Amino acid sequence: MTVSPLAEPPPGDSDFQLVERAVAGDQRAYELLVIKYQRRIERLIGRMVRDTDLVQDIAQETFIRAYRALHQFRGEAQFYTWLYRIAVNTAKKALMDLKRDPLVYESTLAGADDGDETSRLGNEPINEETPETVLAAREIAAAVNAAMEALPEDLRQAVSLREIEGLSYEEIALAMACPIGTVRSRIFRAREAISARVRPLLQNQMGKRW
């Protein structure tokens, strides 16, 4: 169920209100939810699926499944958290069916949705940019990406939800179906692993004079 972004949901219209309207038979209400989250879900799936041609198909299947299960949404978590779990499960099922391996999540320095201000790190121009600083930034981004790739799936998923998707610990706990303490532990371990990989590069760059 892919919808062209012809309009945005009214500011005062919460996700839960849109869900209630959709359950009551208002098709446009669900279309507004699709418009709101389509790019974000496609970006999420794109970090899991190696074949980019499948991203839109899996996203469409995600929204179809969500629509069929809409009456089960109780507002106990944010709608995106609920939708995220459906997207992840749909993508995993597609990968199992196709016997393909998940792709590494993008580097937190490079993962970006144009409309997400928190995702612009690494894309903004910096002062006194030189070929050397650009190369250094690319090396650091590559190190972050390699560190993410090396993480176990549960750690990678937890830190991606926090750093890339911007979810709260409570939302991540709901999305991953585990206690908040487990979420905090996974994110801490993931950050430590990434930091250990990147720290030598940072120290090396700090010792240079451009």
Image (cartoon, rainbow, N blue to C red):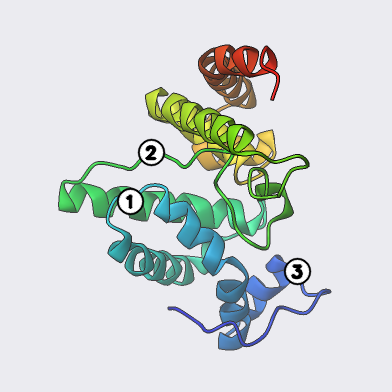
Q: Residue at 55% across / 53% down in the picture?
A: 82
Which amino acid, mark 3?
A: Ser
Q: Residue at x 30, y 42 (%)?
A: 102
Question: Does the rendering let one see residue 157?
Answer: yes
Give the residue pinned by disc 3. 14
CA gap between label 2 and label 1 equals 9 Å
* Quadrant of residue 80 within the rendered picture: bottom right
Whether residue 46 sits left or right of residue 25 in the image: it is left
Residue furthest right in the image: 12
In the image, is 49 to the left or to the right of 176? left
Nearer-the-camera pick, 61 or 200: 200
Residue 78, given in percent of the width and then of the height, sits at: 66, 54
The residue that appears at 50% across and 82% down in the rendered structure is 3
The number of numbered discs placed on residues in the rendered structure image is 3
Is the C-beta separation of discs 3 and 1 under 8 Å?
A: no
Horizontal arrangement in the rendering, residue 129 relative to residue 154 (left or right): right
Q: Is residue 158 above or below residue 164?
A: above
In the shown orientation, is residue 110 left or right of residue 1?
Answer: right
